[in-house]
Amino acid sequence: MVVIFKWQEDVYDTYKAYHITKQLEILWVNELIEIYICTIRDEKNDRKLAHTLIKLYYIIVNYKHETEYRLMIELIKEKIDECDSFIQLLMSEYILETIRDFHFETVEVKNVESALGILKSIAEKPVTKYEGIM
């Protein structure tokens, strides 16, 4: 299964025509995950960070990468204080949506608590603005 975003659906037929093996696709996905993780670790712009995080989220859910899911949670915890409240809200949403979309047999309570902690933090302090929106 290749990750095709909604705005890229027209490329799926072209991709299928190349008959990419599952093993090669998994190799590419793993390389892409590494690129996204490095980008998230190094990114200082919270908008770009959120953009990369959503791409990582889609791969984690579509390919059921449980280890990378846990790493994504840790990356969010590391980066959350560098972001404005709108991006923090998105990050908590990614955590909760991943739990929902991953269909875990058991949900790790600490991950739900992380998302709820972010939401509580946002609610307790003034909303920080992003000049591009306000």
Image: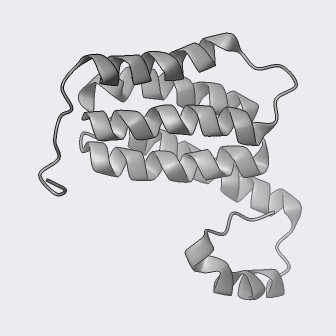
Examine the rendering and report whether any part of residue 46 can be seen. Answer: yes
Image vertical order of residue 29 relative to residue 15, above or below: above
Quadrant where the N terminus lies?
bottom right
What residue is drawn where x is 69% and y is 63%?
Answer: 3
Relative to 81, is 103 on the left or the right?
A: right
- Looking at the rendering, which quadrant does residue 15 occupy? bottom right
Image vertical order of residue 32 relative to residue 87, above or below: below
Examine the rendering and report whether any part of residue 41 can be seen. Answer: no
What residue is drawn where x is 82% and y is 29%?
Answer: 104
Q: Which colour scheme is used?
A: one colour
- Residue 54 spot, x, y in % from top left: 51, 50
Q: Which of 100 and 70 is in front in this view?
A: 100
- Looking at the rendering, which quadrant does residue 121 occupy? top left
- Residue 108 spot, x, y in % from top left: 71, 15
Q: Which of 50 and 121 is in front in this view?
A: 121
Image vertical order of residue 60 relative to residue 83, above or below: below
Relative to 93, is 10 on the left or the right?
A: right
Q: Residue furthest front?
A: 123
Relative to 111, is 102 on the left or the right?
A: right
- Residue 131 spot, x, y in % from top left: 11, 52
- Looking at the rendering, which quadrant does residue 73 occupy? top right
What residue is drawn where x is 32% and y is 24%?
Answer: 122
